[in-house]
């Protein structure tokens, strides 16, 4: 595995300058676009890493996988009354379908869906930010994971589209709490900072039928795990989910911080980080890295 990661890393090292780092959140704009890291964790406890694997970045929308898992654990199948499970075919922060589909977001991984999930987490937990952070710390097997407060604040102050989305959803009665509180929790979950090793470790329960290998706890049921992986495959990369499934063949979730995580059920999780994004808001070097990894190893869920 070390040799394979080295080969893929070297093949992709020069792949920069084909996109842009996210700059609609001011605090994300200054990031060095050359940074690049890969980490693999296996369900029998092996860890492999290369590149800038010690550098932390904000996980952004990858947090939506963790908040979905947390709410499924607390609410079960009832969540499907207020969020769908179909690909949207729209950009990650699109408002169009919310008006057409009367406030029910297509899936939990577009911003609209993530906002309603966060709203219900606020209903179920008196200290929602703390609960989300502790949940992710448990998954990663580490207490050394924090919010990046500057990035959370920067996003909160400039959340024009997400604020519009949240108010539109609330106008249809599908958000219970105060919008500013929902946005505060949402921006904090997006600002959680991890390196690729921590990200791969925190996602590993999805490769292990919902069980955390670091403390032995069953986090969510095998059925709920299957459902989250299925949603990642069909909706995890927004309007590039079809292309990602075609090229990589694994469930995955991206974030505008440049991270992508992918799961090979029964075996491993892999996290890649490279901050430059393509027009869909996904890391193009990250996608290419995952495609090479899956192809060279001959793995996929199919
Ligand atoms: N915090 C970002 C936003 O809501 C997350 C988007 C993403 O990572 O795709 O705009």
Image (spheres, grey):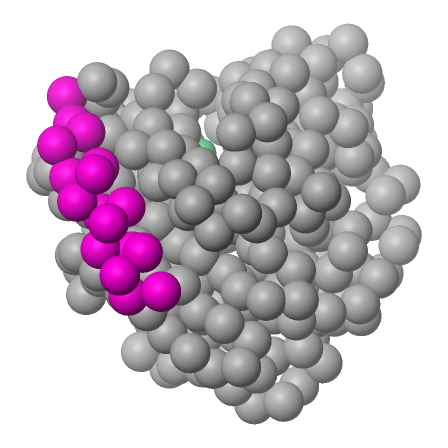
- Is residue 255 rendered magenta in the image? no
| Magenta-colored segment: predominant secondary structure | helix
Task: Find residue 289 and report its image quarter.
Answer: top left
From which residue to which does the magenta span run?
1-17
The location of residue 219, given as percent across then percent down, is 69, 75
The location of residue 27, given as percent across then percent down, is 20, 38
Residue shown at 40% from the left, 25% from the top:
281
Residue shown at 17% from the left, 44% from the top:
10
Task: For ligand 1, give the image quadrant.
Answer: top left
Compared with 48, 148 (above or below) is: above
Residue shown at 31% from the left, 56% from the top:
4
Looking at the image, which is closer to me, 52 or 15? Answer: 15
Horizontally, residue 73 falls left or right of residue 166, namely right
Residue shown at 84% from the left, 62% from the top:
223
Horizontally, residue 155 falls left or right of residue 266, namely left
Compared with 17, 127 (above or below) is: below
Horizontally, residue 170 falls left or right of residue 249, namely right
The location of residue 253, given as percent across then percent down, is 52, 43
Q: Looking at the figure, which quarter contains the C terminus?
A: top right
The location of residue 251, given as percent across then percent down, is 61, 45
Task: Find residue 53 and report its image quarter.
Answer: bottom left
Residue placed farthest to the bottom in the image?
A: 215
């Amino acid at each position: 595995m070390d040799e394979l990661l080295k080969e893929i890393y070297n093949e992709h090292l020069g792949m920069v300058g084909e996109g842009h780092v996210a700059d609609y959140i001011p605090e994300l704009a200054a990031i060095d676009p050359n940074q690049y890291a890969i980490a693999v964790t296996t369900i029998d406890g092996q860890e492999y890493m290369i590149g800038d694997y010690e550098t932390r970045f904000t996980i952004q929308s990858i947090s939506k996988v963790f908040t979905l898992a947390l709410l499924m654990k607390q609410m079960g199948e009832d969540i499907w009354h207020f969020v769908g499970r179909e690909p949207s075919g729209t950009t990650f922060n699109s408002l169009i379908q919310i008006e057409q589909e009367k406030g029910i977001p297509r899936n939990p991984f577009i911003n609209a869906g993530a906002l309603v999930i966060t709203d219900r987490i606020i209903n179920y937990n008196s200290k929602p930010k703390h609960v989300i952070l502790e949940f992710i710390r448990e998954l990663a097997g580490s207490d050394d994971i924090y919010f990046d407060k500057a990035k959370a604040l920067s996003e909160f102050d400039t959340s024009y589209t997400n604020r519009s989305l949240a108010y539109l959803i609330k106008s249809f009665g599908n958000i219970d709490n105060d919008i500013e509180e929902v946005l505060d929790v949402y921006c904090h979950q997006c600002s959680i900072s991890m390196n690729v090793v921590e990200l791969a470790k925190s996602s590993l329960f999805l490769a292990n039928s919902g069980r955390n290998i670091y403390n032995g706890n069953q986090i969510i049921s095998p059925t709920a795990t299957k459902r989250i992986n299925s949603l990642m495959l069909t909706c995890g990369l927004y309007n590039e989910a079809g292309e990602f499934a075609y090229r990589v063949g694994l469930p995955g979730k991206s974030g505008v911080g440049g991270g992508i995580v992918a799961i090979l059920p029964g075996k491993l999780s892999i996290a890649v980080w490279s901050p430059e994004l393509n027009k869909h808001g996904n890391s193009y070097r990250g996608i290419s890295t995952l495609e090479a990894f899956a192809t060279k190893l001959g793995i996929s869920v199919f």
